[in-house]
Image: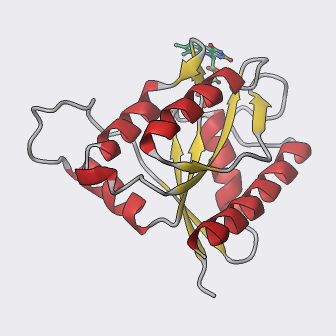
Amino acid sequence: MSNLKILGICGSLRAKSTNMGLLRYAQSHTPTGIEIKIADLSALPFYNADIEQKPDAIQQLFNQITQADALLLACPEYNYSLAPALKNALDWASREPDNRLLSGKPAAIMGAGGGMGTSRAQYHLRQVSIFLNLHLLNNPEIFCNAFDGSFDENGTLINEKIQGLIGDQLVALQQWTRRLSA
Ligand SMILES: Cc1cc2nc3c(=O)[nH]c(=O)nc-3n(C[C@H](O)[C@H](O)[C@H](O)COP(=O)(O)O)c2cc1C
């Protein structure tokens, strides 16, 4: 059976982002049969319907989403909701004809933030995902505190419990994706 291809998309553009730290850990500790690429959102313009010629950064994101079997969304919480960089990437992708990039795509969510672990933002993202027709994995959920020592000063994940949870989530996403495509 071929490897499951997952695309990680992170809503924080910060160099030492803890949310990117979650994706980096997932990428470097993939269970057997999974490979992960991480999208680069740093050059994405804000969605604007007047932009007729797709910038390279958009086209590259679209290609990566197309090639991915599933998405892994790292969801920071800004003012009780999902961060604009993540929403912007999803907004761009949703404008392709018939929502063909996202409709029916399996996805999982993880996030690091304040004391609520980005749960409020993640549930907003789940609401957005209904319209996008993303097929979200329900559990395990991954809600991390970015300020309790779970990450080092570079945003690298050092909390073993969360590391284990990420492994569990990747395996669950693999099974979920296979189930949806059977
Ligand atoms: C504009 C802004 C709003 C924020 N609002 C929230 C919030 O509502 N809830 C929360 O848990 N953290 C909030 N935070 C803190 C972020 O969760 C924290 O900066 C987190 O580390 C961001 O993720 P990163 O390390 O991946 O950049 C906010 C941060 C910013 C910049």
Q: Residue 10 in the image: state x and y as whole percent.
A: 53, 41
| Residue lying at 66% horizontally and 69% vertically, measured from the top left | 179
Classify residue 42 by image quadrant: top left
Q: Residue 153 in the image: state x and y as whole percent.
A: 72, 31
Above or below, 71 against 82 in this view is: below
Name the residue nearer the viewer: 9 or 20: 9
Q: Is residue 138 left or right of residue 102?
A: right
Name the residue nearer the viewer: 4 or 126: 126
Q: For the view shown, which residue lies furthest in the top direction?
A: 79
| Residue lying at 61% horizontally and 24% vertically, measured from the top left | 121
| Residue lying at 75% horizontally and 60% vertically, measured from the top left | 172
Q: Residue 37 in the image: state x and y as whole percent.
A: 52, 61
Q: Is residue 115 left or right of residue 47?
A: right
Q: Could one spot residue 77 in this view of the protein? A: yes
Which quarter of the rendered image does ligand 1 occupy? top right
Q: For the view shown, which residue lies furthest in the bottom direction?
A: 1
Task: Name the quarter where the N terminus is drawn.
Answer: bottom right
